[in-house]
Image (tube, rainbow, N blue to C red):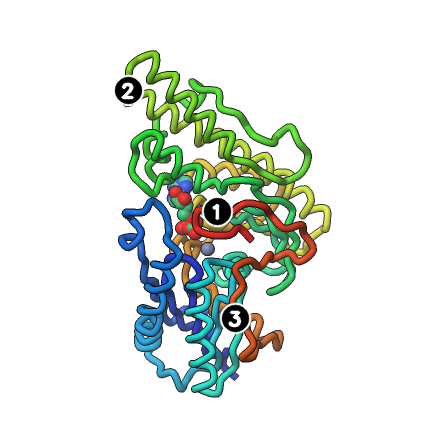
Amino acid sequence: MPDPLILGLESSCDDTAAAVLRGREILSSVVMGQTELHAAFGGVVPEIAARAHAEKLDLAVEEAVSRAGVTLADLDAVAVTAGPGLIGGVLSGVMLAKGLATGLGKPLVGVNHLAGHALTPRLTDGLVYPYLMLLVSGGHCQFLIARGPQEFTRLGGTIDDAPGEAFDKTARLLGLPQPGGPSVEEASKEADETRFAFPRPLLDRPGCDLSFSGLKTALLRTRDKLVAEQGGLHEADRADLCAGFQAAVRDVLREKTRRALALYLAESPAVPAFAIAGGVAANKAIRAALETLCAEVGVRFTAPPLALCTDNAAMIAYAGSELLAAGETADMTLAARPRWPLDRAAAPLLGSGKKGAKA
Ligand code: KG4
Ligand code: ZN
């Protein structure tokens, strides 16, 4: 029997997405962003996002199905993000998926958005369970051991901001364009990362938890001090501030990854592998540091392509296919959940990212 043909829907934040997959083959992946709708507000406005999802979801589905060269009737299942995220958007997706599944008489699968991200290395690189994952983006930062489509152990995560958020804030403080990550990385090239001594938060504490809000404050103070002394910032100041900030994030991620790898390797996994995913995984300095670290301890390093690290529906369809294979289908009682931690045993995280609740 061929692998089932699965439609995936994603609408938990500010991307309206639909994709069609057969097994690990992505037949189509449509992502309709909303950046311009939220641009004037300095962040994602939940009500605007929900309305845009409601308007665009069926268009995304039509396009995904037609680009895949199939019809709705060919589908074997409908998978949808059922949380965590901005509730209005999640609801739009869940309602449409219920309608489609009922109309087509096909199974419905409710997918955890974070599981979608966490299973992406299986879709792209065929990793086998258990593998260690670092999810690091504008909204998330956590270390997970993935053991199965619904089985994750959280080793640690940020206790305040996500690193992408800190990159964005840094860029804003220095008058560089958004998204901040690429601007800060670009400005750091050939700059002096040792000129400003930024803190390496939480390195003095055991464990894999991280913190980035203090780093942001340190950057703000250093900037203000320079402005007070010189009356403004020179190009070189800006570059050195960026480089110092990026080096601090890199060092913290490297040390915490070292600890997470040690915990993971203590379980003697059959095929040790590490994956980094999320927007911040695009950062070459961070990536190179973690790649070197993995080589040192004999762990395979993978990083899914960026288009599959940022929000998309291919990851939802893929996670849906694993759940379907495990018989984990949903029914019409499937609820949209604003919060939905991956590790059911771990203590809930406090705080809320700029794009919604951190699960
Ligand atoms: O995964 P993502 O696209 O979206 C969510 O957070 O949901 O991640 C976006 C984040 C932004 O904060 C952006 O500044 C950051 O990833 N980012 C980077 C780089 N490219 C994107 N951070 C550091 N270096 C980069 N090259
Ligand atoms: Zn996401």
How far apart, in angstroms, are the residues tagged by discs 3 and 2? Answer: 51 Å
Q: Disc 1, disc 2: CB below 8 Å? A: no
Label 3 neighbour load within 10 Å: few <14, some 14-19, many 20+: many
Amino acid on which disc 3 is placed? Gly
Residue 355 seen in this snapshot: yes
Residue 223, quarter of picture: top left
Q: Earlier in the sequence, mark 3 or mark 2?
A: 2
| Label 1 secondary element | strand
Closer to the camera in the image, 172 or 253: 172
Residue located beneath label 2 in the image: 234
Q: Is mark 1 within 8 Å of ligand 1?
A: yes
- Position above or below: 146 against 81: above
Closer to the camera in the image, 228 or 133: 228
How far apart, in angstroms, are the residues tagged by discs 1 and 2? Answer: 32 Å
Residue located beneath label 3 in the image: 320
Amino acid on which disc 1 is placed? Gly
| Label 2 secondary element | loop
Mark whose residue sits in front, 1 or 2: 1
Image side of residue 265 versus residue 90, left or right: right
- Which label sits on residue 353? 1
Amino acid on which disc 2 is placed? His
Q: Residue at x 42, y 75 (%)?
A: 96
Closer to the camera in the image, 180 or 218: 218
Q: Disc 3, disc 1: CB below 8 Å? A: no
Measured as percent of width and height from the top left, residue 90 is found at: 46, 65
Residue 125 seen in this snapshot: no
| Residue lying furthest front | 47
Q: Residue at x 52, y 84 (%)?
A: 1
| Label 3 secondary element | helix
